[in-house]
Image (cartoon, rainbow, N blue to C red):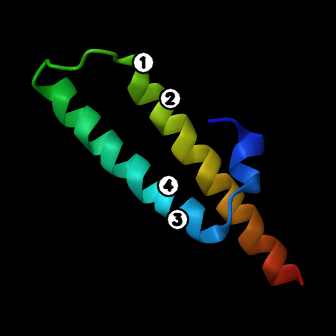
């Protein structure tokens, strides 16, 4: 997921996607713990996607506070 795609999403879509990604990361961590993870780089990608979404949410919250 690219940062431009994240910025275009609505607040509801961002919260929904964030929830889905956190659930996916939980499942990936569980698979990693029992040595059944096929693609370990997926964990890194999911973490970065979560960070992108949280950054956009934080930026929107701070812009609303200023307005």
Cβ atoms at labels 3 and 4 below 8 Å apart: yes
Cβ atoms at labels 1 and 2 below 8 Å apart: yes
Where residue 24 sits in the image (x, y, percent)? Answer: 33, 42
Tag on residue 13? none
33 displayed left or right of 18: left
Label 4 belongs to which residue? 17
For residue 59, what is the image quadrant?
Answer: bottom right
Cβ atoms at labels 3 and 2 below 8 Å apart: no
For residue 43, what is the image quadrant?
Answer: top left
Where residue 4 sits in the image (x, y, percent)? Answer: 78, 43
Q: CA distance from mark 2 to mark 4?
A: 14 Å
Query: Which of marks 2 and 3 precedes in the sequence?
Result: 3
The quadrant in which the N terminus is found is top right
Label 2 crowd bin: few (<14), some (14–19), many (20+), radius 10 Å: few
Tell me the element at label 3: helix
Q: CA distance from mark 1 to mark 2?
A: 6 Å
34 displayed left or right of 22: left
Label 2 belongs to which residue? 45
Label 4 crowd bin: few (<14), some (14–19), many (20+), radius 10 Å: some
- Say if 29 sits above or below 59 in the image: above
10 displayed left or right of 17: right
The residue drawn where x is 77% and y is 72% is: 62
Query: Which of marks 1 and 4 precedes in the sequence?
Result: 4
Label 3 belongs to which residue? 15
Q: CA distance from mark 3 to mark 2?
A: 18 Å
Label 1 belongs to which residue? 41
Q: CA distance from mark 3 to mark 4?
A: 6 Å
């Amino acid at each position: 997921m690219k940062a431009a795609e994240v910025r275009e999403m609505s607040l509801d879509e961002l919260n929904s996607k964030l929830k889905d990604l956190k659930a996916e990361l939980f499942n990936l961590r569980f698979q990693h713990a029992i040595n059944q993870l096929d693609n370990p780089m997926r964990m890194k990608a999911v973490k970065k996607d979560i960070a992108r979404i949280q950054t956009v949410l934080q930026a929107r919250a701070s812009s609303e506070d200023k307005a």
